[in-house]
Amino acid sequence: MPEIRVTPLGAGQDVGRSCILVSIAGKNVMLDCGMHMGFNDDRRFPDFSYITQNGRLTDFLDCVIISHFHLDHCGALPYFSEMVGYDGPIYMTHPTQAICPILLEDYRKIAVDKKGEANFFTSQMIKDCMKKVVAVHLHQTVQVDDELEIKAYYAGHVLGAAMFQIKVGSESVVYTGDYNMTPDRHLGAAWIDRCRPNLLITESTYATTIRDSKRCRERDFLKKVHETVERGGKVLIPVFALGRAQELCILLETFWERMNLKVPIYFSTGLTEKANHYYKLFITWTNQKIRKTFVQRNMFEFKHIKAFDRAFADNPGPMVVFATPGMLHAGQSLQIFRKWAGNEKNMVIMPGYCVQGTVGHKILSGQRKLEMEGRQVLEVKMQVEYMSFSAHADAKGIMQLVGQAEPENVLLVHGEAKKMEFLRQKIEQEFRLLPETKKPRLLHGTLIMKDSNLRLVSSEQALKELGLAEHQLRFTCRVHLQDTRKEQETALRVYSHLKSTLKDHCVQHLPDGSVTVESILIQAAAHSEDPGTKVLLVSWTYQDEELGSFLTALLKKGLPQAPS
Amino acid sequence: MKLYCLSGHPTLPCNVLKFKSTTIMLDCGLDVTSTLNFLPLPLVQSPRLSNLPGWSLKDGNAFLDKELKECSGHVFVDSVPEFCLPETELIDLSTVDVILISNYHCMMALPYITEHTGFTGTVYATEPTVQIGRLLMEELVNFIERVPKTQSASLWKNKGIQRLLPSPLKDAVEVSTWRRCYTMQEVNSALSKIQLVGYSQKIELFGAVQVTPLSSGYALGSSNWIIQSHYEKVSYVSGSSLLTTHPQPMDQASLKNSDVLILTGLTQIPTANPDGMVGEFCSNLALTVRNGGNVLVPCYPSGVIYDLLECLYQYIDSAGLSSVPFYFISPVANSSLEFSQIFAEWLCHNKQSKVYLPEPPFPHAELIQTNKLKHYPSIHGDFSNDFRQPCVVFTGHPSLRFGDVVHFMELWGKSSLNTVIFTEPDFSYLEALAPYQPLAMKCIYCPIDTRLNFIQVSKLLKEVQPLHVVCPEQYTQPPPTQSHRMDLMIDCQPPAMSYRRAEVLALPFKRRYEKIEIMPELADSLVPMEIKPGISLATVSAVLHTKDNKHVLQPPPRPAQPPGKKRKRVSEDTPDCKVLKPLLSGSIPVEQFVQTLEKHGFSDIKVEDTAKGHIVLLQEAETLIQIEEDSTHIICDNDEMLRVRLRDLVLKFLQKF
């Protein structure tokens, strides 16, 4: 079995900076190229110098595959391709290709414009990087070169998220990226066929969670929003324009519809309209229900959610506002936050991770007095809630996927070491290999090698094709038997003895008095000198040697006494 | 390998391919041209149609006058319209493993096959094919069900009676198997058996055969199919286009190196140039509207209509038509317009890139937004309030036998100001118009068929070089109306094999090899010898593992050491005959053989010459070895040790295979 080598440059036993190198049958593939939200220094990006110290990455990598648009899976891509230098193909699905550059640009703006980082990738680099992208369809087998092929499967984690099968000859690896095995508000469940890869590399973020925790979180979220608006408070939800925002909008929209609520919901302008448009155009990537009903009612055309105007922030009475950006570090979300922070009736819900140094991070870590620019101090009296809505498979889902794909080996990544250990044991328990039950069959033939063409043919055919004659090697052994009866009777005794002994073989008594066992011929003859002895001539070819020598040994022991 | 041909319609094919233990149905087209023999189903009671005279035989016998009506010299069946199904008796359809669908027009018979033949397999199609196919079926069912007709004529189908009828009724084929339309329930059940596939997806059928859909460039999600094993390849080309319209371009390269290429679905109007037709369509439309007339465009709810709307989008302002209302009337009009916008991944590059902006790929979104194009499920309801003339109406069905188009034909047919423009190529426009005669309305025939024409086919065949071409018989001779046009047929070498309805073709190739993988451990143990320059041989003894039609050669198991207590009984166990010995080749040089015998301690050796060779006598051992050119015979006493020693010495001189 050729070697498959896996080297995580990130997200080995950790979440963030996903980047895994896979070497399979001489091909090198990089899976994801993410950044780490928790670091602001070199550790933010994977260490690409591991791949090569001085050569060009393009010479060492056959292709790069991006599983989905989350920054911990694609955030380092422009750095990797434009600053370190990679010109080979980058594969991702159509929605990922559409949305990825927008998130990268957002990320770049925060890093450069807000934090003033130098030596960061530029907008032009994002554009140049995206030019190297080749979009793939679901289930399309993409031939990267003559030997390497990749295939995308639906992963359900975010719009356009995919799992990838990487195949060279008969060797294959499946990389799941992030996936979700239960359909949610807007996406379907991950699915893979029984492709039996040699290795399945699966994320294990929720390796130990079994219950459907997402439903609970959703209920929790709705309850908090509902309670706050019921008592007349305002709810601020800082979000990024794409991804979670649409999911939460659907959640609130359906809740509002069901509960017949009249409290206004606003979405801060900017990308929103455009973002929702992406979801409308890529509706084939959403779940069955949305796809089925989109003609009558497009889930991404919201009835209750209206565009926000900055004047609305001072309106009296309850409201819910989605505002960008998601970490409260600038812009509209921060402005609204400053206005509402002083009132304990209000609430801010952070639906995602916040980078250190942002207002979002500060309030989540419990800080209630914030120093704003101009030495102002902002006292936070409003309630602060954190809720993670990421859609990952739980332990049950991971087991389900392993069961679907039937891999030979499973590699857990993108999770915590301790939890992985637990899941490892579970997988080993449940999917122990069953021994092969079929009886093996022996095959004999000749392999003809001509140029790079190999053909297995029968030996006879090989001789014939090469114009060679067969050389027959035959043995005849004399076996002496004490028997005074006539030769014919001896032959008959031999026949009945062999017939009863060799149940699995074809034993025949021929008209000429000889006995055959398969192709072995036995003839009885009189002994030239001793009339009380008969000579059995046992004759066989080299090809029947085992049976022939067995028969002589058997006959040498004599025949059983005749019953009469 | 056999091909069962179940449909005689070249653009609505239905064939079954038996290939390597799998039974694969290629498309299941429904021949709807049969409905041309029926009277139109009017949405609103039509005095003209209901007062048509009954038809009577020459001798005045009028026993058929309830079933058959006459209109301007043509005879029509007054009944619920019926369709001509693919042949269902030629092969047991419950044995079909899979059905491969190439485009949404070629799946309309699916409910008849999947619901009424015991079919238990899987249907493969792309997502746009399924979604738009569903719309076409929904529209068809809706058109027929919303005008319930009590009369179902059957008398005329009687063989004896059919002979007496005028053409084309007299010549209609298999009328006894014609069936009424299916129900929505059957449609849903049929569609639930479809598994969605993507272009270039390799789909394994039982591990024996791999099928792959390829973009065919004709319609949204339309595909050609590759059906292959490791050593054989069949390409199924159905409804392909090389023109740049909205779908993804045709994938030609993947069709190369086919043993057999089955070619169906070529253009039905080989003499018309689609681009020219579009131009004619626009100018005729403008002319009519400017003169105060209305334009009726009988059409399917998906396909060419997208291109026509796009042309009009660019054309109407410059032609001064921006105030003319465009109506699109179909029970699935809204769905069709919406669906077209979400299949970006299946569109040509130009349209695909729009989604990244993000903008809808088709400009009809803007036509709808600006109220220039309005769509309605039917003429009832909102439409009657909004209806303004002069206007342009796109509506179905292109056969003019059912759907809202019947109403507009009745409404506008009497005025020569109005124009009906035929763009769909599936029906002869003269036959379609026959039950509306006499007609004052202008009729323009601009058939737009983007499928391959014969020039493109011969170019394609030169490019992909299949060993054999199989096609419907219609393509191997010029069209009957243009019998002098020898260029309007397939020209290839060897000549294409043709098929007709209910025929079984034996495809001209034999399978000879299977792919087997050799485990590296086994490969390591092989010892190749070069027999001739460039040709090496190695004998292989191995265990063949076969699972899911995949074959792997593994090293043979080591001869198991029998457990200690059994050792005594070893000789009593019958030997495992499955240990195979190689064949031998070569010849034994007697002198060297004798020397070798001596070296190994045999003495008293005598050699006698015979007619064919020599006899070597080992007198002490009472052993005789006959050596001939291509055989050796060792005759000895029952002394296994001796025999084995001699054997090994003989084998030294021979090659094993």
Image (cartoon, coloured by chain):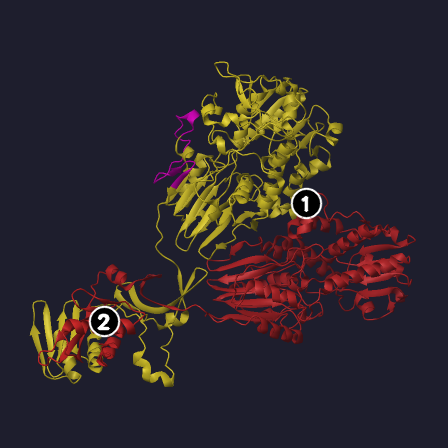
Q: Chain of mark 2?
A: A
Colour red, chain = A
> What residue would you read off at disc 1?
B359
B497 is within the stretch colored magenta: yes
Span highlighted in magenta in the image: B478-504
Q: Chain of mark 1?
A: B
Tell me if I can see residue A127 in this picture.
yes
- In the image, are marks 2 and 1 on the same chain? no
The color chain B is rendered in: yellow
Q: Compared with residue B510, is residue B604 higher up or lower down, i.e. above or below?
A: below
- Find residue A244 and report its horizontal and vertical position in percent: 73, 58
Residue A474 x %, y %: 19, 71
At label 2, which amino acid type do we have?
A: Tyr
Question: In front here: B187 or B267?
Answer: B187
Residue identified by numbered label 2: A495
Q: Nearer the viewer, residue A135 or B265?
A: B265
Is B645 situated left or right of B382 in this image?
A: left
Query: Which residue: 63% across, 72% down?
Result: A423
- For the stretch drawn in magenta, the main secondary structure is loop
